[in-house]
Amino acid sequence: MRELLEDLDRWRESGRRVALARVVATEGSSPRGAGAAMAVNESGEVIGSVSGGCVEGAVVGAALEVLEGKRPPGVITFGYSDDEAFSVGLTCGGTIHLFVEELDW
């Protein structure tokens, strides 16, 4: 999370709305552990990583939906048996649970 702070501060100063996705739990093998974070601003700029690239695109989509009010903040899960996760490349055999929310500056 610390690696995101400089960019988050810049986005805050410029008035950008930002959604934060954090790994809150893992099961089995996972590319990143609990605490890994990724932020997405309203323009679609991304910093950080929650899966080393496996499901980043789907997480960006979920984060933008939170910012647009199309999805409530909350936990999303990707696992090997999840059709969407498999289609975007989560093949490590594990499951990751992410909490996605809009930052309240």
Image (cartoon, rainbow, N blue to C red):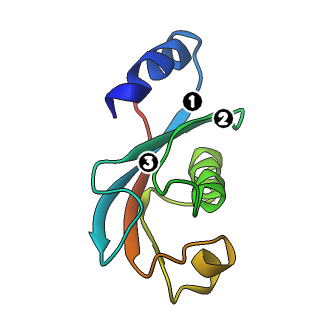
Tag count: 3
> Which image quarter: residue 32?
bottom left
The kind of residue tagged 1 is Arg
Residue receiving disc 3: 101
Residue 16 lies left or right of residue 103; in this view the side is right
Q: Secondary structure at mark 1?
A: loop
Asked if disc 1 and disc 2 are in contact, CB closer than 8 Å, the reply is yes
**Relative to 75, does residue 8 appear above or below in the rendering?**
above
Residue at the farthest top position: 13
Q: Residues within 10 Å of mark 2 (few under 14, many from 20)?
A: some
Q: Secondary structure at mark 3?
A: strand
Q: Position of residue 56 (x, y in %)?
A: 59, 55
The kind of residue tagged 3 is Glu
For the C terminus, the image quarter is top left
Q: Position of residue 50 (x, y in %)?
A: 45, 52
Q: Residue 42, labelled with which disc?
A: 2
**Relative to 20, does residue 11 appear above or below in the rendering?**
above
Identify the mark nearer the N-term, 2 or 3: 2
Residue at the farthest bottom position: 81
